[in-house]
Image: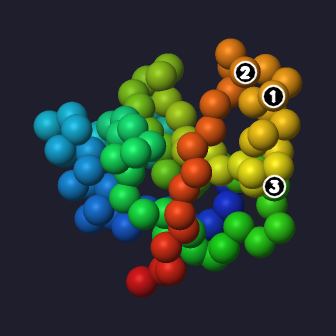
Amino acid sequence: MIPTVGIRWFDVDEIRAASIARNGSDGKLCLGCNRWRWLPVPVERLPPFRIEPSLGDADIAASPEWFGDGWNSFRQVLVRRELAELLAQASPRDFDFAEVTIASPR
């Protein structure tokens, strides 16, 4: 089980703008779980990660924000480089990774 870390990873206004630019809409409330789900945004178009509180010593962590719609819902996942490289080496068809920069919280 991947732990959820932090209160939020993205500035609300920045993720809303990125989602609208990509999808024409920001997202919607899931009536089944009463959770806001942002429409998907590719990693390279996500705003800076602003993780509050920090990841600490977690090797893998899931964002508190949800993305997608219905059964196609997901969270962003951060993995420490060493673990990411191990996963990609063990199963290159299933795992790929991109380096991200974590900005200071506002």
* Front tag of 3 and 1: 1
Q: Give the structural element (helix, strand or loop) at label 2.
A: loop
* Residue drawn at (57%, 43%) of the image: 98
Q: In the picture, residue 39 is in which quadrant?
A: top left
Work out which residue is located at the far top of the displayed protein and give it. Answer: 93
Side of 82 where 10 appears, left or right = left
Cβ–Cβ below 8 Å for labels 1 and 2? Answer: yes
Q: Which amino acid does label 3 sit on?
A: Asp
54 with respect to 19 (left or right): right
Name the secondary structure under disc 3.
loop
Callout 2: few (<14), some (14-19), or many (20+) C-alpha neighbours within 10 Å?
Answer: few
Q: What residue type is labelled 1?
A: Gln
Tell me if residue 30 comes above or below residue 51 in the rendering: above
Q: Where is residue 3 in the image (x, y as percent from the top left)?
A: 75, 51
Instruction: Give the percent coordinates (x, y) of residue 44.
Output: 40, 45
Residue at left 58%, top 51%?
99
Q: Mark 3 points at which residue?
A: 59
Q: Is residue 30 visible?
A: no
Q: Residues within 10 Å of mark 1 (few under 14, many from 20)?
A: few
Q: Distance between the residues labelled 3 and 1?
A: 17 Å
Which of pointers 3 and 1 lies earlier in the amino acid sequence? 3
Q: Where is residue 74 in the image (x, y as percent from the top left)?
A: 53, 34
Q: Do the residues labelled 3 and 1 touch (CB within 8 Å)?
A: no
Residue on which disc 1 sits? 89
Question: What residue is drawn where x is 49% and y is 30%?
Answer: 73
Amino acid type, label 2: Pro
Q: Position of residue 75 (x, y in %)?
A: 55, 42
- Numbered label attached to residue 92: 2
C-alpha span from label 3 to label 2: 19 Å
Front label number (3 vs 2): 2
